[in-house]
């Protein structure tokens, strides 16, 4: 089986996809304690041999990791990860390299230089495309990353992909970078789904986007925070006041647009608040799941539960989350369950890309075999 190492593993969305594509994930490195609990619990349930390393990536020496995993004797096939994106997010301050989290992106290069994987697979927010470097050049950070990968002997390609085009019930655009240690003939996977409501569709037969209603089928009624859920993570923590405020908002609509509702119900929301107090539509993919704002159920006056977030994100039902479920009016240290999902890569898209990487590696191996014989 082909081998892989996961950096910035989070709740394991990317790990699931890579593993489903046929790779053995030797180690997952993550600093958040709740995410590490999630990783360990699912490794135990599924009997994987993955080692979870709960440390800040900057405190991990790749040479020590290489020796611990025996990679000095056998090559590593894949190094993958989704470094923290807040420094490049279009929602945040876009501080890029002025934010120390932006520099974490280059930890992928530090590890690759020592571990020498055949392929490097990176996920990042769309804002990376325009992120400014130290000289203020738009797009300079992405250029730096690609240049650094080339300096250590890799050939990188990147592409902006939308999860909804790969069967995920969510509109989520992210940058994916795949760098190979040989001439890069890698091709990103073709889309399998399309928006049938848009004009000028491809002539190729693609499936329609998956709607939220389709993935939430059969999940049943959630329980309260102190009750045992029939479905792990299917817990409703909606405050009473928020249930009152979402009443009167139609499916697919948001509270600020409901001019017929009392001012005290709308509160201080402005016309720009299109994602706050948003009800999703059953017939359409969800907006991008976020860490701060949780969207409301299409027809029930409550927030989506962590399990519903997982369904929308493409997690398998047998996968469970550990850690707290944060009330919308409360706070927790580290990542609560909703944010664990929102921060992660949708497993189906990770699998689609990792499957193409596996095919690429197989072609490379076949070519080398022909040359040697």
Image (cartoon, rainbow, N blue to C red):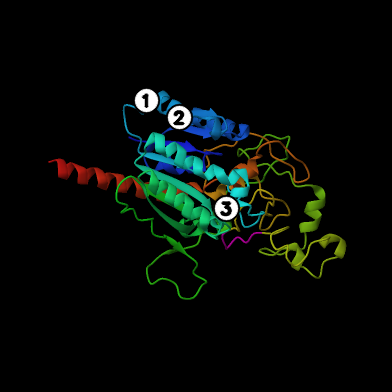
Are circles 2 and 1 on residues that touch, CB within 8 Å?
A: no
Q: Where is mark 2, residue-wise? A: 50
In this view, the residue in front, 215 or 145, is 145
The segment highlighted magenta reads 280-285
Is residue 218 left or right of 226 when viewed as pictured? left
Quadrant assignment for the N terminus: top left
Task: Give the Cα distance between marks 3 and 1.
Answer: 38 Å
Q: Where is mark 3, residue-wise? A: 134
- Residue reaching furthest front? 135
- Residue at 46 percent of width and 75 percent of height: 200
Q: Residues within 10 Å of mark 2 (few under 14, many from 20)?
A: some
Dot 1: element: loop
Q: Residues within 10 Å of mark 1 (few under 14, many from 20)?
A: few
Q: Position of residue 13 (x, y in %)?
A: 51, 43
Q: Where is mark 1, residue-wise? A: 70
Task: Give the Cα distance between marks 2 and 1.
Answer: 14 Å
Which callout, 2 or 3, points at the residue further toward the start of the chain? 2
- Residue at 54 percent of width and 57 percent of height: 126
């Amino acid at each position: 089986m082909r081998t892989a190492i996961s950096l910035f593993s989070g709740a394991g969305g990317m790990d699931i996809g890579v593993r489903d594509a046929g790779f053995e994930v030797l180690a997952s490195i993550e600093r958040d304690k709740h995410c590490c609990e999630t990783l360990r619990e699912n490794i135990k349930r599924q009997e994987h041999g993955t080692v979870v390393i709960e440390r800040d990536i900057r405190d991990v020496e790749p040479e020590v990791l290489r020796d611990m995993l025996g990679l000095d004797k056998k090559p590593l096939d894949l190094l993958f990860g989704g470094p923290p994106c807040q420094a490049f997010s279009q929602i945040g301050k876009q501080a890029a390299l002025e934010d120390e989290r932006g520099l974490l992106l280059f930890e992928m290069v530090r590890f690759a230089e020592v571990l020498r994987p055949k392929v490097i697979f990176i996920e990042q927010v769309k804002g990376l495309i325009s992120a400014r470097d130290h000289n203020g050049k738009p797009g300079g950070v992405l250029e730096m990353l690609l240049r650094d990968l080339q300096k250590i002997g890799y050939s990188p390609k990147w592409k902006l992909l939308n999860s909804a085009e790969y069967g995920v019930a969510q509109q989520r655009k992210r940058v994916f970078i795949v760098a190979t240690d040989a001439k890069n003939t890698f091709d990103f996977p073709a889309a399998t789904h399309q928006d049938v409501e848009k004009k000028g569709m491809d002539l190729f037969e693609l499936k329609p986007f998956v709607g939220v209603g389709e993935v939430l089928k059969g999940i049943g009624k959630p329980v309260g925070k102190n009750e045992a859920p029939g479905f792990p993570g299917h817990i409703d923590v909606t405050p009473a006041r928020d249930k009152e405020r979402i009443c009167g908002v139609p499916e697919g609509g948001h509270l600020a647009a409901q001019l017929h509702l009392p001012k005290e119900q709308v509160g201080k929301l402005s016309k720009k608040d299109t994602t706050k107090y948003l009800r999703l539509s059953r017939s359409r993919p969800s907006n991008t799941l976020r860490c701060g704002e949780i969207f409301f159920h299409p027809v029930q006056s409550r927030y989506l539960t962590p399990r519903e977030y997982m369904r929308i994100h493409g997690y398998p039902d047998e996968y469970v989350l550990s850690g707290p479920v944060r009330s919308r009016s409360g706070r927790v240290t580290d990542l609560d369950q909703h944010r664990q999902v929102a921060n992660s890569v949708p497993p189906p898209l990770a699998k689609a890309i990792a499957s193409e990487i596996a095919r690429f590696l197989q072609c490379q191996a076949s070519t080398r075999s022909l040359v040697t014989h």
